[in-house]
Image (cartoon, rainbow, N blue to C red):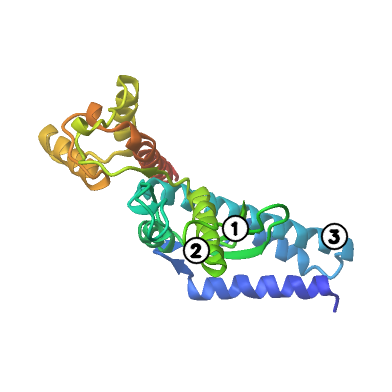
């Protein structure tokens, strides 16, 4: 039996097994593609020549890759809609031990980013691993490459090149560890478009900038399309919308113009995702 025929049988067996166990991940049913069924019906034809069989296997692989990318993009959009800005809470002092205080600066630590992001990655089936190779050029250091994998089978990579982080009071081993942590942090933030912010008191008096009127109008439109307003009357519907915003913001609002500019993109993405889901559900309900 040729390798191509063996590949067909393996894929076909997988499809049968998937039907038998009715695969479910996070409550979402993974459906078998009817086009794949047709491909394997043709593949069982003994008169089918090797070239056509290889073409069918290639077609099935391309379909599987496309579906994996679709699932990746879908879950990435949902994951990013839940990501929060990370506060710069850790401090780096610029003076060495025994020196006069030269001040310092704040930054968002990798562990703070991980604390926010890990539950979201788990929820949507993402995992990440890292590789390190020596960096060429002055300063030594590493090139940190991250691989972000999704439960659907698709993956992407990102790299960040850094010189050795030989800051005040660090030996070579500590400098290598700091460089590695720094690189992993920036690769991870790049995957999920994570932003950093300074701590504030959650009030506009602290300098928070509200959304524009056009952005507020867009939120009104998205809320309507997302169908998050529920209740028997207008008062109840407004209350459910207010609760939704309170759950997804770190502060309470009484008008759309009170949403902060720093939160607009995240909230708009989340509402857009819910709106798309509502449209898909409505379209399914219209099918005969």
- Quadrant where the image shows the N terminus: bottom right
* 42 displayed left or right of 88: right
The disc, 1 or 3, on the residue closer to the chain's N-terminal end is: 3
Q: Nearer the viewer, residue 273 or 41?
A: 273
* Dot in front, 2 or 1: 2
Q: Which residue is mark 2?
A: 170
**Residues at marks 1 and 3 touching, judged by CB atoms closer than 8 Å:** no
Please rate how many residues cluster around mark 1, counting C-alpha atoms within 10 Å: few if below 14, some from 14 to 19, many from 20: many
- Residue 230 in view: no
Disc 1 versus disc 3: nearer the observer: 1
**Most extreme residue toward the bottom, as rendered?**
1
Residue at the spot 42% in from the left edge and 57% down from the top edge: 96
Residue 19 image point, x, y percent: 54, 71
Residue 224: x and y in percent read 29, 32
- The one of 182 and 241 positioned closer to us in this rendering: 182
Secondary structure beneath dot 1 equals loop
**Distance Cα–Cα, label 1 vs label 3:** 54 Å
Local SS, label 2:
loop
- Which residue is disc 1 drawn over? 164
- Mark number displayed over residue 45: none
Mark 3: few/some/many CA within 10 Å (<14, 14-19, 20+): few
Residue 52, label in figure: 3
Q: Helix, strand or loop at disc 3?
A: helix
165 to the left or right of 282: right
């Amino acid at each position: 039996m040729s390798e191509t025929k063996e590949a067909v049988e393996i894929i076909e067996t997988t499809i049968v097994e998937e039907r038998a166990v009715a695969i479910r991940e996070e409550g979402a049913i993974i459906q078998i593609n009817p086009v794949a069924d047709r491909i394997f019906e043709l593949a069982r034809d003994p008169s089918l020549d090797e070239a056509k069989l290889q073409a069918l296997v290639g077609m099935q692989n391309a379909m599987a890759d496309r579906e994996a990318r679709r699932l990746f993009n879908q879950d990435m959009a949902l994951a990013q809609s839940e990501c929060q800005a990370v506060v710069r809470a850790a401090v780096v002092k610029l003076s060495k031990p025994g020196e006069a205080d030269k001040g310092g600066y704040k930054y968002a630590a990798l562990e703070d980013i991980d604390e926010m992001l890990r539950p979201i990655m788990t929820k949507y089936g993402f995992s990440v691993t890292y590789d390190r190779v020596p960096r060429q050029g002055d300063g030594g250091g590493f090139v940190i490459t991250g691989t972000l994998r999704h439960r659907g089978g698709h993956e992407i990579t990102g790299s960040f090149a850094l010189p050795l982080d030989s800051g005040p009071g660090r030996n070579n081993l500590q400098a290598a560890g700091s460089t590695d942590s720094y690189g992993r942090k920036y690769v991870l933030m790049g995957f999920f478009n994570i932003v950093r912010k300074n701590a504030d008191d959650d009030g506009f008096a602290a300098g928070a900038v509200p959304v524009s009127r056009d952005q507020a109008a867009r939120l009104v439109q998205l809320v309507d399309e997302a169908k998050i307003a529920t209740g028997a009357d207008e008062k109840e519907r407004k209350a459910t919308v207010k609760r939704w915003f309170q759950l997804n913001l770190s502060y309470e609002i009484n008008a759309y113009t009170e949403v902060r500019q720093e939160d607009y993109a995240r909230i708009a993405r989340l509402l857009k995702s819910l709106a798309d889901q509502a449209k898909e559900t409505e379209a399914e309900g219209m099918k005969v």
